[in-house]
Image (cartoon, helix red, strand yellow):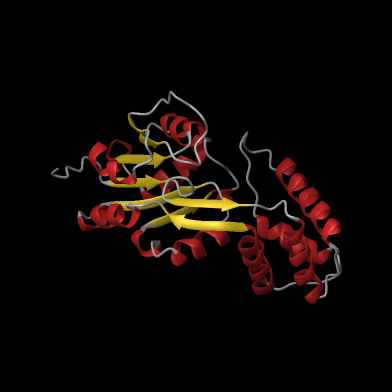
Amino acid sequence: MRVVLMYKNFIFDLYGTLVDIKTNESRKAFWEKLALFYSYNGAAYNYSELKKTYLKEVKEELKANTKTKYPDIRLSLVFEKLYENKGVKADKETVNQTMKLFRVLSVDYIRLYPGVIELLKELKSKDRKVFMLSNGQREFTVPELKLLGIYNYFDGLYSSSDIEICKPDKAFFDYLIEKERLNRQETIFIGNDDKCDAEGSAAASLDCVYIHSNLSRNVTEVNSKYQIWDGDVNKIINYI
């Protein structure tokens, strides 16, 4: 099939759309290892105290963010606070390494969906602009994009932690559109979430490709111009 590209700008969700990931932060061993790392850095915690304090700090940060119905936080501030609670002034590098360990310990697997690299290569070969708009922490997504070999395909990366606003709030979509000076009629969003991606992009006046993946909610109807229900990333290029 001949590829015909109608859009100039392609904004992708990340997890569940391009990247298949499974994380688990509930294991006792997870918190034991993280508590040990904090203790190695002078902030002595046992696993239960660390877990309880972490969840409390996250809850308080989210509650304090009143600028949106869909708040996010800069998780780095929580990790820094966990050191401060024990009288330790952690530098930026220590906080960053703590965040990386947190993520590594939580990941059961992370991998690209089949066809992702081929899709991104095709878009870049046609001089299309490619962006990421993801609910998540930049400190997690950037290393993972590099790990998976797709970092260099993107012209811009936007994480919800950047402005502490999550999809489906249209303000997050507008932030990217306005910062990159994109024409909405020339821009399409691709994502796997019926609410965050499909409804959010619609609110921002963007066309959308909804792709139903293993990480999507159990829905049978979605308000999206294009729909792929078998999770086949290879079909995205044919819908646009």
Whole-percent x, y for residue 139 in the image? 57, 61
Whole-percent x, y for residue 21 in the image? 52, 52
Q: Is residue 106 left or right of residue 119?
A: right
**Residue 44 visible, this orientation:** yes
Q: For this rendering, which residue is in front, 118 or 72? A: 118
Q: Is residue 167 left or right of residue 180?
A: right
Residue drawn 31% across the image and 41% down it:
187
Residue drawn 26% across the image and 52% down it:
128
Q: Quadrant of the C terminus?
A: top left
Q: Which quadrant would residue 186 be assigned to in this image?
A: top left
Q: Is residue 135 left or right of residue 207?
A: right
Is residue 170 placed above or below 137 in the rendered structure? above
Is residue 42 placed above or below 180 in the rendered structure? below
Whole-percent x, y for residue 218 in the image? 51, 30
**Residue 41 visible, this orientation:** no
Q: Is residue 155 left or right of residue 83?
A: left
Say how many tags the image has.
0
Furthest residue toward left: 2
Is residue 62 placed above or below 39 in the rendered structure? above
Residue drawn 83% across the image and 52% down it:
52
Q: For this rendering, which residue is in front, 70 or 47? A: 47
Q: Which quadrant would residue 203 be assigned to in this image?
A: top left
Whole-percent x, y for residue 34 in the image? 74, 65
Q: Quadrant of the N terminus?
A: top left
